[in-house]
Image: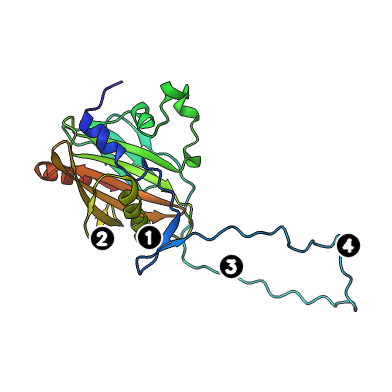
Amino acid sequence: MRKFTTIITLCLVLTLAACGFEPTGVVSEGGETLPLPEPRDVSDAPETPDEPIEPDEPIEPNEPDEPTEPATTGAVAIATYERGILTDTSFESDYLGLRFTLPPGFVMATPEEILDMMDLGAAAFDLDQDIVDYAALTATYDMVAFSPAGFPNVIVLTELMPISDITVEQYFDNVKVMFASTGPDFRFGDLGTIEVAGETYTKLPASLEMLGETVLQDYIMRKHGDRMVGFILSYTDETADEAELLMAAFEKY
């Protein structure tokens, strides 16, 4: 297995999924962190009677209504998460709606290396990667492509949300709180939007000092069913053009 440079290894550690995002509260619009609701205690709930209650008078059955056409709301059902198909030079995912062709001069991480990044290395855990239930994992890296020099690199990731109705903005607010308490000295920019492969994503730019240089990271996410999905793009000022080349290689599935 190839050994990653110190730079890319550190950069991969400093990601949303690697930090195990599990919010203890939701940040409100006013900036206040609100606690998650406690589970309801149903131990004192009245028991359901064993015997059915007979009505006082017989109830005449209603006439059946005329059959009607099922209502259509225009909503599109979202499929259950499935891991994409990864090769040495390409990646595609029906679930994410993405297709990627590796540009010249870049390297694709192998499935074994990605498992190691997710702390699920087959060697360490005696796991066959073919039997890993990715859909049951809180966070997954589907693809990692990088320059042999370390920067730029891009991670395609998904993260299962513990709160079904959390927005991307609330997700990023919690990320900022998490990094402020446990991570390095990140400096965050303003939220914006970006189009990738025909989909609109929310982008949170960040920067930090690492190994004597300024590392830039763009957290590019959107809500997809019960998951946040997207990219973490890491680069430097000198490799910004190459970073754009990496993102331009993503196409609609």
Rate crowding at label 2 as few (under 14), some (14 to 19) or many (20 or more) other CA atoms within 10 Å. Answer: few
158 is higher (above) or lower (below) than 102: below
Q: Residue furthest front?
A: 181
Q: Amino acid at mark 3?
A: Pro
Nearer the observer: mark 1 or 4; the answer is 1
Which is more toward the observer, 174 or 143? 174
Nearer the observer: mark 3 or 1; the answer is 1
Q: Please give the residue where the numbered disc 1 appears in the rendered image.
A: 170
Residue 191, numbered circle: 2
Q: Number of marks in the image?
A: 4
Nearer the observer: mark 3 or 4; the answer is 4
Contact (Cβ within 8 Å) of mark 3 with mark 1: no
Q: Position of residue 20 (x, y in %)?
A: 40, 43
141 is higher (above) or lower (below) than 67: above
82 is higher (above) or lower (below) than 77: above
Residue 165 lies left or right of residue 249; in this view the side is right
